């Protein structure tokens, strides 16, 4: 996290790469956000619209902040937004009962927290979406992709590098942390299909360069 801007995980000023130099080659999975609250708060879909609540976010203009302010605009003055310097601090205060709730990924799940709703329009792991709980049509989820640098010519090398990661303990740990529920076989299929598209892209790039 950037020490100068707590609203994002990385400072744009620190990035030395151009996003246009990268192309997605595999889809890892999605991770919706969940509104977590301490059981002692008794926060539910039935009463969240009628009571005053303090909801924590991981910083101004963060994804959790954008969605929390969307909830605030829908529910009105009953919702107060509390800004933290990171998601962990917000979840920790929600767990302690200092605030009524905080948005976080599935990895924050704990027996000391209750998930009231998730930020998609569908039920996830038995937790209702925002449409069912709040009547909101907006939704939010993080999508995780594997990208390859378009300057990297050897797709066999890319395939070996990605396959090595997928078959490693790190992939299992990362998947659990991010709340990604996809098998290695599914991701490998995505890599195969993604690299086929990547090869076609490389051909177009080479043709384009030949005409420059």
Image (cartoon, rainbow, N blue to C red):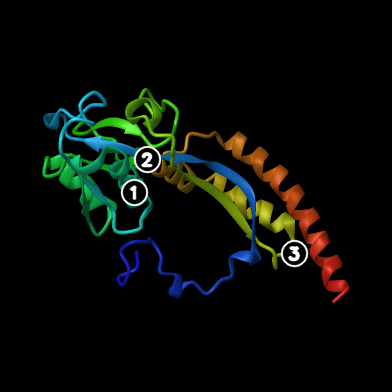
| Mark carried by residue 64 | 1
Q: Are marks 1 and 2 in contact (CB under 8 Å)?
A: yes
Q: CA distance from mark 3 to mark 1?
A: 38 Å
Position of residue 116 measured from the top left corner of the image (x, y, whole percent) = 28, 30
Identify the residue at horizontal 32%, vertical 51% (top origin).
65
Q: How many marks?
A: 3
Q: Quarter holding the C terminus?
A: bottom right
Q: CA distance from mark 3 to mark 2?
A: 37 Å
Q: Nearer the viewer, mark 3 or mark 2?
A: 2
Q: Quarter holding the N terminus?
A: bottom left
Instruction: Decide which of tag 3 and tag 2 comes sooner along the chain.
Output: 2
Identify the residue at horizontal 29%, vertical 36% (top origin).
109
Q: Name the residue tied to disc 2.
A: 33
Q: Name the residue tied to disc 3.
A: 153
Q: Are marks 3 and 1 in contact (CB under 8 Å)?
A: no
Query: Residue 183's image quarter?
Result: top right
Instruction: Decide which of tag 3 and tag 1 comes sooner along the chain.
Output: 1
Instruction: Decide which of tag 1 and tag 2 comes sooner along the chain.
Output: 2
Residue at disc 1, secondary structure: helix
Q: Is residue 58 left or right of residue 80?
A: right
């Amino acid at each position: 996290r950037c020490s100068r801007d707590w609203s994002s995980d990385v400072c744009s000023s620190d990035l030395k790469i151009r996003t246009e130099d990268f192309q997605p080659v595999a889809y890892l999975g999605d991770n919706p956000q969940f509104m977590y609250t301490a059981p002692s708060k008794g926060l539910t879909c039935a009463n969240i619209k009628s009571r005053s609540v303090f909801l924590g976010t991981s910083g101004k203009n963060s994804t959790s902040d954008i969605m929390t302010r969307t909830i605030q605009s829908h529910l009105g003055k009953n919702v107060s937004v509390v800004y933290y310097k990171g998601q962990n601090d917000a979840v920790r205060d929600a767990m302690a009962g200092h605030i009524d709730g905080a948005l976080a990924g599935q990895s924050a799940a704990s027996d000391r927290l209750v998930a009231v709703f998730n930020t998609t329009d569908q039920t996830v792991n038995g937790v209702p979406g925002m449409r069912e709980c709040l009547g909101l049509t907006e939704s939010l989820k993080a999508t995780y992709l594997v990208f390859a640098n378009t300057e990297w010519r050897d797709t066999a090398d890319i395939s070996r590098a990605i396959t090595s990661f997928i078959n490693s303990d790190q992939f299992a740990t990362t998947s659990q942390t991010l709340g990604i529920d996809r098998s290695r076989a599914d991701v490998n299929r995505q890599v195969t299909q993604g690299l086929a598209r990547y090869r076609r892209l490389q051909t177009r790039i080479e043709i384009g360069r030949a005409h420059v």
